[in-house]
Image: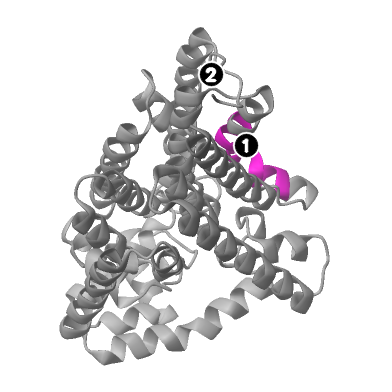
Amino acid sequence: MSAIPIETLFDEERMRVYPRLSLLIYLLAAIAVVASSTALIDVFGKPLGYDFITFWSASLLTLQGHAADAFDFQKIFAAQRIAVPAGQSIFLWHYPPTFQLLAAPLALLPYLVSYLVFTFGTLALYVITCGRLLKLKEATILLVAFPGVFICAFHGQNSFLSAALFAGAVLAMERRPALAGVLLGLLAFKPQFGLLIPVALIASRQWRLFFITGATAAAFALVATLVFGVDLWLAFFKDAPVVRQIMESGFLPWGKMPSAFIFLRMLGVPAMLAYAAQILTAAGAAAAVAWVWYRQGPTRLAFAVLVSATLLLTPYIFDYEFAILAVPLAILASDMVDRGATRNEKIALVALYGVPAIAAPLAGATHLQIGFPLLLLALGFSVRRALSRQAEASSL
């Protein structure tokens, strides 16, 4: 018998009205940004599509046969001026050849058209996959109204694709585990999101899945190498110290970076101590993944732990990656529907759903990056539900 009280998850009327109200706010905000822009430059001096200009510019250089030029700040800025001639801000490229391979076709379309196709195409993948994880009547509207979606779409970022690969792997795991391995391997387009996958698969002794995932990632990297050559990998690794330098210097917007390192740096903690805390956080996240996967294998709740832990792993993470948080949230919400939830769990779920909307503005106003504690909450919540479900199964 469940130790968790069975209650209605949320009031049906609120679930119907609030997401639609959020979508209306997003729509009005988007209209205001576009209407107040001039020559594709918004009132903040940034190009419409924001980070997407980096993807489009790297694609242009790649299509011209100069893929490594994406790491040259002068050349990528020149490409960005082709996309948006009035632009004055530079957006640097820090991605591996695997993602450069995926992004290569983007400049075949004009900048704004390409941004819309990429954003809505990957958003559709996100909604289709995550929607099948969320056992609620209003699943689609809840997923689209999640603040992480607006943030990701505003930035023209690739987090919808990451979320879709994670969610697709969860779905495939139950009937087509080989496909799950392929989807997990494709996360090599953003390697930091695959670092805990071997930990999970080894801990759960999923050897076939481990080899399929590894083979897919290796094949992905090999194709990128055959297309671009080894030199692009050298340029990527040479760029790593640049990323660290601009992150530590504050050149990147700390208020939009919900990591342990940035959380402490914004509080004035010295860099070395902040890095130590980041390492401890990553180690704790890895230990949580190993323990849960060892205990119960590749269950949906174990995947919620994996995805939540992944978002805590590195110091270099941005608020647009809150979109990936939709995967554990969909799993947790569905589990709460199945088994009920306490009042505190409901409050935690609402906080995880809504707080990403204010994390960056609040950090800018108060120098307190609440995004990091929010991600800790997601991991703790996922671990608690996973272990409680196993305890219930053991007692039957």
- Judge from the rendering whether residue 65 lies leftward or rightward of residue 7; answer left or right: left
Q: Secondary structure at mark 1?
A: loop
Q: Nearer the viewer, residue 34 or 293?
A: 293
Residue under the image location 47 percent in, 43 percent down: 328
Task: Please tell me whether residue 131 is drawn above or below residue 338 in the rendered image.
Answer: below
Residue under the image location 45 percent in, 71 percent down: 92
Residue under the image location 61 percent in, 67 percent down: 282
Find residue 170 and report its horizontal and vertical position in percent: 33, 47
Q: Which residue is label 1 attached to?
A: 355
Q: Which residue is label 2 attached to?
A: 9
Please give the count of numbered marks on the rendered protein: 2
* Snapshot colouring: one colour
* Foreground: disc 1 or disc 2: 2
Q: Does label 1 or label 2 sit earlier along the sequence?
A: 2
Task: Please tell me whether residue 62 is drawn above or below residue 12 in the rendered image.
Answer: below
Find residue 361 and report its horizontal and vertical position in percent: 67, 43
- In the image, the segment drawn in magenta is 350-363
Q: Give the alpha-carbon distance from disc 1 to disc 2, as whole Å.
A: 19 Å
